[in-house]
Image (cartoon, helix red, strand yellow):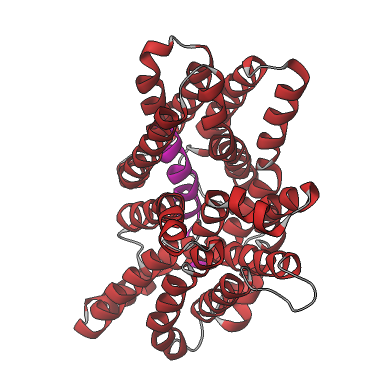
Amino acid sequence: MTQATNAAQDLETDRPGNRRRLAFLGVCLVLIGLNLRTVFSSFSAVLPELTSDVGLPGWAVVVLTTVPVTLLGVFAPLAPFLARRFGAERVLLGAMAVLTAGLLIRPSELPGAGHLPTLLAGTALCGAAIALCNVLLPGVVKRDFPHRLGLMGGLYTTAICASAALGAGVTYPVYTATGEWTAALWFWAVPAAVVLLLFLPLALRKHTDPAPPAGGGVSVWRSGVAWQVTLFMVLQAMMSFSGFAWLSPILRERGVDGGTAGFLVAACIVLQMLGSLFAPALAARMWDQRAINVVVALMTGSGFALCIFGPLELVWAWVALLGLGQGALTAVALTMIMLRTRDGHTAARLSGMMQGVGYGLGSSGTLLVGQLHQVTGTFAAAGVLFLVVGSLAAVFGYRAGIKRYVGG
């Protein structure tokens, strides 16, 4: 029965109209990925100017920088349910509409109340929308590109990395050109709105997803394979969020000047994009993924530790090791969603579990690094933490890389 279904899907895919639809869908998925991290990096890029102008209290800065990440975990489990109810494309369309609205609301000013309420509301909307997109993208790729998992996985994960780089690199020049931090943040509603309009005809034409498997499908929460993949994601996320938050302060504490530290962080992001582009294709071609999971986990953990403990003369090498490892690690962790499931419905459920738990617990890495630094006065303890987390990621990556499927 499965072979007959796959053969029918292959015949459908071979039709010129369906090939064009799939190509357009693939472009839209990549463009959606390009909008999923600008919320984080654009806010950080103008945070000093925003804080000075608005007079944000300390608690508000903490909330505005942590709420989006927290919401990634809160809303992720809802995405598979919404997709079954309305269809994945329509939920993605709705999420892009909410993201656009959140980006428009965020820099606005509420008469009599100032910027803080709109900053909070807009940021919350953006976090919820990104959570839904994060979860549904792997399921759509699994469903519509089963023979191009490596290519599509690499393209959309690279787009997500590029999104962070664009937010960090473009926001401040827009602020410099306009003199307004509000304009610099409003700018990011434009690409989100463009993707919304491009995706609109495709999403409305897609009425329903294929029916889920009989019996309601696989229970990912009772699957040992699903938990191994999820723990791999948790440990990956701990290192990933720590890198976003702490790489520059780590380098500055070691005596690297601000300009050089900025170049090093930028180089790290570029190398993350390179790693995320090639790692999914390599992982998909391998018999199993044990070797690549272990290697990229150890590269990331040791790259972090060497940025703290290694000779400063070789700091470019340490940053290169970290960037390539972290980009590849994030990409292969997301690729596990597609490689460890047999259908799009199970992929969406695993994605919801994996990203809900992963982002919910993974953000604790940033907090741990900050607490360790506050208690000890240095990043040395954090270096040991990175080695431990990288080693644990290698262990669970090895288990997650064994060739088997959620649900048997």
Name the main secondary structure of what is drawn in magenta: helix
Which residues are drawn in magenta? Answer: 325-344
Q: Residue 199 location in percent, x, y?
A: 41, 80
Compare residues 80 and 212 and report the one nearer the observer.
80
341 in the magenta segment:
yes
Furthest residue toward top: 311
Q: Residue 121 location in percent, x, y?
A: 71, 69
Q: Quadrant of the N terminus?
A: bottom left
Compare residues 289 and 218 and report the one nearer the observer.
289
Q: Residue 44 location in percent, x, y?
A: 57, 49
Furthest residue toward left: 16
257 relative to 100, above or below: above
Q: Is residue 69 visible?
A: no
Q: Residue 275 location in percent, x, y?
A: 35, 39
Left or right? Give the position of 157 relative to 365.
left
Quarter where residue 345 is shown:
bottom right
Quarter where residue 396 is shown:
top right
Compare residues 243 and 93 and report the one nearer the observer.
243
Left or right? Give the position of 97 relative to 303.
right
The residue at the point 66 percent across, 57 percent down is 53
382 relative to 248, above or below: above
Q: Is residue 256 visible?
A: yes
The residue at the point 52 percent across, 31 percent down is 248
14 relative to 255, above or below: below
Total numbered badges shown on the rendered structure? 0
The residue at the point 63 percent across, 14 percent down is 380
5 in the magenta segment:
no
Quarter where residue 311 is shown:
top left
